[in-house]
Image (cartoon, rainbow, N blue to C red):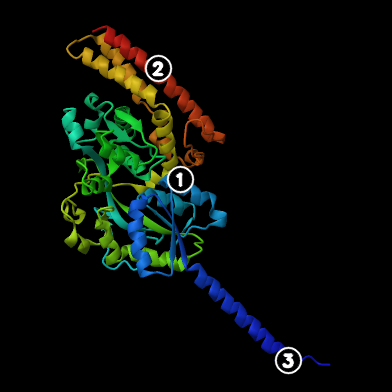
Amino acid sequence: MKPNRKIWASAFAFTAAAGTFFAASAAAAADTELVIVTSFAPDQTVVFKNAFTKAHPDIKLNIINKGTASGVKYLQETAGNNKTDLFWVSSPDAFEVLKANHLLEKYAPDTKGTASEISGYQIDDPDGYFFGFALSGYGYMWNTRYLQSYKLPVPQTWEDLTKPIYYGHLGISAPSRSGTTHLEIETILQAQGWDKGWATIKKMASNAKRITNRSFGVPEGVDSGEFGIGIVIDYFGFTSKAAGFPVEFHYPPATTLVPATIGVVANAPHKQAAHEFVNFVLSPQGQALLFNPKVMRLPVNKEAYKNAPAGIPNPFEGQIKASVHFNSDLSQSRYNVVNSLYDVMITYRFSELRAAVKAIDEAEAALKSSSKPEAKKLLDEAKALVYGVPITEQKASEKDFSAAFTGKRKKATDKVTGRQAEFEKDWDNHAVANYRKAEDLAKQAKSMA
């Protein structure tokens, strides 16, 4: 008996059609969800979530909150079975890291009305892997009542924050815990140079009351009066003031303007929904949401500033004097090294650093009206020990060297392996010995007053 070709053909056609139907159904089902990893606070992301869900009621948003460095590490570790659609943070250099790791996917969103650059800095990745949706400036906020109570002057520069009068009055996070803090640290390094920059950073950090676990902890501390001054991204100051707290924000001269950024993750499971969200945040409606009192960010759409709240500067009209042209490639080349150096020298040896700097400050105050070469020599030696860096700027950016720094520690007792562990142990040994010796030298100098 010959097979019935018509029956077989019909069966094949049905099977193919069914396969196409179920594949299309699966794609449609995938587009009913969207997974975003972001460093932004929930009270900010909910503003966009509610507006996007209203415009796209068929798409369910799942927002996962992680610090920038943690988010980068998460995407690196889950790349083989990626379940994230979008990465959404303030730090463009974090996107450079992901791009170099081939963890982002090209897209061409509707950018009509958005600016292409700010002060010569490209707002969008020229290769189409990530896009600026807002602009960010860096500086510090302060509690006006706190400064009045302690009779502290309003600082004008990063160098002002290194002065002994601010000892114990600052709040700061760590770049390994906060992408915005990383940008602030990099801005100072790029503005002042490697050695002088780290000296400023160490001295400024020694004036902190504590190192917060997340960037959010800094504005919360300033709002509550725990800190007088906080090293923050601009919108933290703007949102606190909009909420009624007695705070002000200042951009120091050595600051930068860079885009807060969004990008589609490679192999995003809900690609179409991801594209819709990117288009939404870049649209006039999405840009207008940046002026919500809980968000208070600077749009990349110039027209949006026609409806800007009072006190929000327009960067496109020169109202923010940013003297630092941020080098994302340089930052990306040493991203994890800078994070590791900060933690080893500052975060994990915070009490030792503070004690050494305080001893130096007290010795300088005691010797202010004295001209004793021996004491000055001891103080100079103490400063060199405290403010020195164990590696050069060139070394920090060497590809083979920086590639060793793949581990991330949440606390000093967490373990890292390989060459990173060796380098960090060596740095820590030097930090402990140098801080202790510097404290002793400063006390000797003070005794000569």
Q: Secondary structure at mark 1?
A: helix
Q: Label 1 sits on what residue type?
A: Ser
Q: Position of residue 18 (x, y in %)?
A: 61, 80
Foreground disc of the pair 1, 2: 1
As drawn, is 59 to the left or to the right of 209?
A: right
Q: State the residue at coordinates (45%, 40%).
A: 398
- Work out whether mark 3 precedes mark 1 in sequence or the reverse, and give the earlier one: 3
Near mark 3 (Cα within 10 A), the count class, few <14, some 14-19 or many ≥20, is: few
Real-space CA distance between mark 3 and mark 1, rounded to the nearest whole angstrom: 59 Å
Q: CA distance from mark 1 to mark 2?
A: 32 Å
* Residue 279 appears in the figure: no
Task: Name which residue type carries label 2.
Answer: Arg
Q: Residue 62 versus residue 443: which sits nearer the camera? A: 62
Image quadrant in which the C terminus is located: top left
Badge 2 or badge 3: first in the primary sequence: 3
Residue in the image at 30% along x and 63% along y:
286
**Residue wearing tag 1:** 70
Q: Secondary structure at mark 3?
A: helix
The quadrant in which the N terminus is found is: bottom right
Q: Does any portion of residue 167 appear in the rendered image?
A: yes
Res 252 → quadrant: top left
Residue sitting farthest toward the right: 1
The mark found on residue 436 in the picture is 2
User: Is 288 rendered above or below residue 215?
Assistant: below
Residue 334 spot, x, y in % from top left: 42, 41
Residue drawn 40% across the image and 29% down it? 345
Look at the picture and state if 381 lies above or below 410: above
Place of residue 33 in the rendered image (x, y in percent of width and height, measured from the top left):
47, 64
The residue under label 3 is 5
